[in-house]
Amino acid sequence: MISSFYTSATGAINLQSGFDVTANNIANVSTVGYKPSNASFADLIYTNIHAEPGADSELKSGHGTKVEKTDTIFNEGGLRQTGRALDYALVNPNNYFAVESNGEVKYTRNGNFHLSVEDGASYLVSSDGGYVLDANGGRIAMEREEDTPAIGVFSVENEDGLVRSGNTCFQLSNLSGAAAAVTDPEMKQNYLEDSAVNIADQMTSVIEMQRAFQFNSKMVQLSDEIMQTVNSLR
């Protein structure tokens, strides 16, 4: 009975982590350029029962579930016209703007840009204040919002290898490979890419995990009641 208690508790704890992933997706349903995450679950190790050491048996005891990994779903969001000169949306998949922030270069599809004045010069910056880079990795100086900036657009060999850094930014990794500048990139001015979150899918995920959490919680309660009954026997 102790085994059932800890198995159910482990499942409930890891389902809470899954809830956190889904809740973050729902919270960013209106975030420009946001890509949702998906939590995948896996069984913990099984123990053979009534078997010789090293042998396999038909009777096994599980030990709950765990969050095996969290994947980013790189679906494209819909394009929304804003009528604002410094709003840009990328048309093709696996295309990203490069943004320099705190000495690090990150990649994003959030094209909600602004002008920042520093030492008498104006630079194109992202919504969080990072410098938008051109195709050569340099900062983009602008005088007016009506100017046409030479914004750099980059792609990577393996998009799934990108590491999330914040809600809409990603960093390179050994799995993603290096970023390469895209020749003649297709982007739309006066447009933004909406969040790729499908609220119906997220609510379905909430219901599935809620049912699983209720089941594990009930098992914890039953295990506790049985242990109390056993301990009260004289």
Image (cartoon, rainbow, N blue to C red):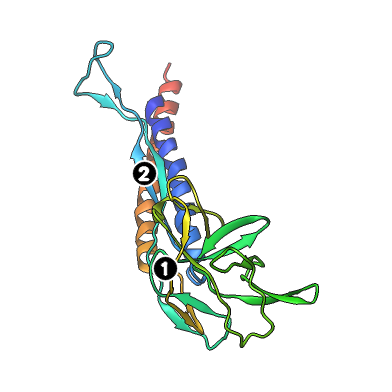
- Of residues 31 and 45, which is closer to you in this image? 31
Left or right for 108, reference 114: left
Residue 175 is tagged as none
Does residue 197 appear in the picture of this structure? yes
Image-quadrant location for residue 74: bottom left
Q: Which label sits in the foreground, 2 or 1? A: 1
Q: Which residue is mark 1?
A: 196
Q: Residue at x 31, y 27 (%)?
A: 46
**Rendered view: 192 above or below 40:** below
Please identify the residue farthest to the top as the structure is shown. 52
Q: Amino acid at mark 1?
A: Ala
Q: Residues within 10 Å of mark 2 (few under 14, many from 20)?
A: some
- Residue 152, percent across and down? 53, 69
Tell me the crowding category of disc 1: few under 14, some 14 to 19, or many 20 or more residues within 10 angstroms, Cα based: many
62 or 114: nearer the viewer? 114
In the picture, the quarter occupied by the N terminus is: top left
Q: Secondary structure at mark 1?
A: loop
Seen as rendered, the residue at the extreme right is: 119
Residue 167 visible to an observer of this rendering? no
Q: From this view, report whether residue 134 is shown above or below residue 39.
A: below
Say which residue appears at 53% left-offset and 73% top-offset: 111
> Disc 2 or 1, which lies upstream in sequence?
2
Q: Depth check: give the residue in front, 174 or 70.
A: 174
Q: What is the quadrant of residue 225 in the picture?
A: top left
- Residue 219 lies, with reference to residue 202, above or below; the image says above
Query: As drawn, is 101 to the left or to the right of 13?
Result: right
The amino acid on which the numbered mark 2 sits, given as a three-letter code, is Phe
Residue at (35, 51) in percent of width and height: 211
Query: What residue is shown at x 67% (from left), y 85% (from top)?
Result: 144
Find residue 41 and name its label. Answer: 2
Mark 2–mark 1 distance (CA, rounded to whole Å): 22 Å
